[in-house]
Amino acid sequence: MRHLSKIVLAGSFLAGIPAQAVTEINYWLWDQNQPPAYRACADAFEKNNPDIKIKITQTGWFDYWNALSAAFVSGTAPDVITDHLARYPEFIQNNLLVDLAPLIARDKVPTNIYFGGLVKVWGRDGKQYGLPKDWDTIAIVYNKTMLEKAGIDPKSLSNLDWNPKDGGSFGQLIAKLSVDANGKAGTEAGFDPKNVKQYGLLIGGQVDGFGQVEWSHLAVSNGFKFYDGPWAKHFNYDDPRLAETIQWIADMELKTGFIVPAKDARQAGANGLFAGQKGALAFVGSWDIHWCKENCKFDIGFALLPKGPTGRHTMFNGLADSIWVGSKHQEEAWKWVKFLASPEAQKIVGSYGVVFPAVPEGTEMAKSKMGESGVDVSAFVDEAADPNATFLFPITDHASDVLRITRAAFDSIFLNGENAAKTLKAANEEINALFE
């Protein structure tokens, strides 16, 4: 029996090719709506790369960054991460990401196929730390029934103007859409700002110094500039144009009752309150289109942001995939990242209609898929396509400290009613001291 088993084993070895070693690449992301799309990408990738398996792990936003920080320290980080512009400056400062520039050059990977400047924002000093995967802009989501009750044509929302003096037509609109417990609108005498049943506008209660969804578009449309450009060593949070923007929002929250107070929006957030029909309008990021469609049990629509004194502006952000410098399988990780950045993968992602891929063809597929449910998402795409309407998400060293300082400042303004100009000036001095 012993000799027979040897023959059988030898025969099986000679008859077939030994099983090929398989390398597992760990890939992390935070958006709960995206694993199906990326599993489809992984299936397509694995079909052409049978020696590589992709393991996808999804955790919520806050847990994601906490887990990633711990994994970097312990040396157990994933091979490939979904990366954010607010985080990667700190990562490269600590030498945690692989420079992709030599790999891009070696494999002749095209980098001119993406929207706007999405490639450039992921580079510094000739090095490249990520390849674009998607992009996002901000728009208005509205409750159609609430607009109808107020006699407002949804089409008029995309022609609104705003200024910090009197609020413009946008300010008038949110006043008209605000309703107190007695049924009085904000434009009527006797409106009770302390007893509001329906707010004209919902803004999230946890505000920071980048204000992507909450305030950046209003401030920049008023002439504010965060800084002179990526990696600048001086911020302009003491700009009077920012102060008057933030003061306008605070007054709408704490005095007039037309915007939900920050203290009431801290837990549920603007999206949760909107889904709960606590307000007629909300500022929303394009990454939450799918969430809104899934969670709002009423008819919704999306509209362009209002035009400010300098025009219409939206923050333009884009995520990327980055490789951890400690990965033991960097070549295989690069193959995965290169694939995710390709039109093939981005069209797969686009076909799921959850986010707008960085490749234009993927964006068109996503737009069409989202439109199949009867919701027009062109407001987000039109803003992204207008080169005069977008400004980049702030890219800076000391981002975590900038956010820490500004969160405290905005809490003082929106929760405690502190003067915006005075509070932001003090915060700006503390921030700029970080770069000295």
Image (tube, rainbow, N blue to C red):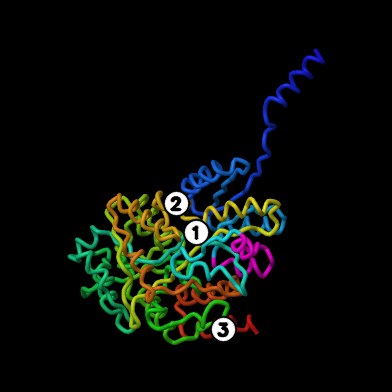
Q: Quadrant of residue 11?
A: top right
Q: Nearer the viewer, mark 2 or mark 3?
A: 2
- Cα–Cα gap, marks 2 and 3: 38 Å
- Identify the residue position indicated by label 3 in the image: 234
Residue 249, x across and y down, in percent: 38, 76
Residue 240 shows up from this direction: yes
Give the numbered dot on residue 133: 1
The numbered mark, 2 or 3, whose residue comes first in the sequence reads: 3
Q: Residue furthest right?
A: 2
**Which one is in front, 273 or 368?**
368
| Rendered-image quadrant of the N terminus | top right
Residue positioned 53% across, 75% down in the render: 406
Magenta-drawn stretch contains 105: yes
Please report the bounds of the magenta region as a residue range. 85-106
Residue 175, x across and y down, in percent: 27, 72
Give the numbered dot on residue 349: 2
**Which one is in front, 430 or 131?**
131
Residue positioned 39% across, 53% down in the render: 290
Residue 159, x across and y down, in percent: 25, 73
Label 1: element kind? loop
Label 2: element kind? helix
Residue 271, x across and y down, in percent: 39, 59
Q: Look at label 3 and name its amino acid.
A: His
The numbered mark, 2 or 1, whose residue comes first in the sequence reads: 1
